[in-house]
Amino acid sequence: MTVNFDKLVSILLDRGEKRRSITLIAEPPYSGKSTLALNLC
């Protein structure tokens, strides 16, 4: 499944609305995980 940034934000907000959730971002080194995490905060 491929999602863009806006869809990812929507998924995370929907999950967090009803219960606590933990989201894991798993990618190879230097693939942009830190940048993505900063943009989500």
Image (cartoon, grey):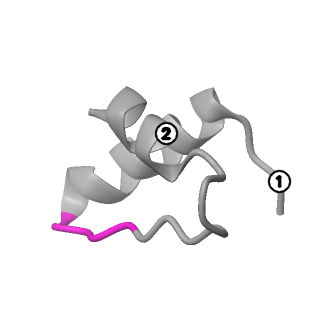
Q: Which mark is residue 2?
A: 1
Callout 2: few (<14), some (14-19), or many (20+) C-alpha neighbours within 10 Å? few
Locate residue 17, reporting x and y percent: 24, 50
Q: Left or right of 29: which side holds 1?
A: right
Residue 17 part of the magenta-drawn span:
no
Locate residue 2, reporting x and y percent: 82, 53
Q: Decide which of 21, 35 is in the foreground and name it.
A: 35
Q: Main secondary structure of the magenta part?
A: loop
Mark 1 lies on a secondary structure that is loop
Span shown in magenta? 19-23
Callout 1: few (<14), some (14-19), or many (20+) C-alpha neighbours within 10 Å? few
Q: Which mark is residue 21?
A: none
Say which residue appears at 58% left-offset and 45% top-offset.
Answer: 32
- 32 above or below 15? above
Q: Decide which of 5, 37 is in the foreground and name it.
A: 37
Q: Quadrant of the C terminus?
A: top left
Residue annotated with mark 2: 36
Q: Amino acid at mark 2?
A: Leu
Locate residue 26, reporting x and y percent: 56, 71
Say which residue appears at 66% left-offset and 52% top-offset.
Answer: 31
Q: Left or right of 14: which side holds 30?
A: right
Q: How many marks?
A: 2
Q: Left or right of 32: which side holds 4?
A: right
Q: Quadrant of the N terminus?
A: bottom right
Q: Decide which of 4, 33 is in the foreground and name it.
A: 33
